[in-house]
Amino acid sequence: RFKPRPYFVVLCRCKEDVQMTFVTAKKYNIPVRIRASGHDHEGESSGDGLIVIDVSNMDHVKVDMATKIAHIGPGNQFKDLTTKLANQNVMVPHGTCGTVAIA
């Protein structure tokens, strides 16, 4: 197994953190990769000489009960998300691996 060496891993808590990281990466011409759960067997969520934007802490869920539309953070793993949504009588289609994140 390879061991990627990114320059930085930025643990984002909100969309503004993500935006600022993209602005900084563009300013210094550094490539970026997004990581939500790290559930990636192709190595696409990391690499050498880049910035990893980790959105795993962005796991908010807000459901508009009038419309039944859910606003879901990209760090939600399906194993947790299905429970959060079921408690509010809504659901989202997904695959069979619970550790995959919505992003």
Image (tube, rainbow, N blue to C red):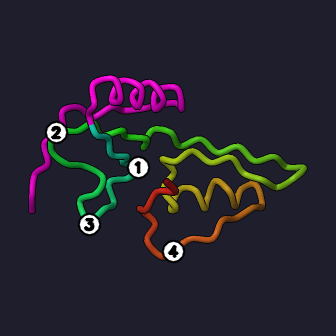
Earlier along the polypeptide chain: callout 1 or callout 3? 1
Instruction: Identify the mark at residue 7; answer none if there is no mark.
Output: none
Instruction: Identify the mark at residue 49; answer none if there is no mark.
Output: 2
Query: Looking at the picture, does residue 75 appear above or below residue 23?
Result: below
How far is mark 2 from mark 3, CA to CA?
19 Å
The kind of secondary structure element at disc 1 is loop
Q: Amino acid at mark 1?
A: Ala
Q: Amino acid at mark 4?
A: Gly
What residue did someone put label 1 on? 36
Query: Looking at the picture, does residue 11 appear above or below residue 99?
Result: above
Residue at the image point whose x is 24% and y is 49% from the top: 46
Q: Is residue 58 left or right of residue 49?
A: right
Residue at the image point whose x is 39% and y is 28% from the top: 21
What residue did someone put label 3 on? 41
Residue 51: image location, x then y, percent: 27, 36
User: Do the residues under discs 4 and 3 have CB atoms within 8 angstroms?
Assistant: no
Residue 8: image location, x then y, percent: 23, 31
User: Do the residues under discs 2 and 4 have CB atoms within 8 angstroms?
Assistant: no
Q: 4 or 71, which lies in front?
A: 4
How far is mark 2 from mark 4, CA to CA?
32 Å
Q: Amino acid at mark 2?
A: Gly
Residue at the image point whose x is 36% and y is 24% from the top: 24
Earlier along the polypeptide chain: callout 1 or callout 2? 1
Q: Which residues are magenta?
A: 1-30
What residue did someone put label 4 on? 95
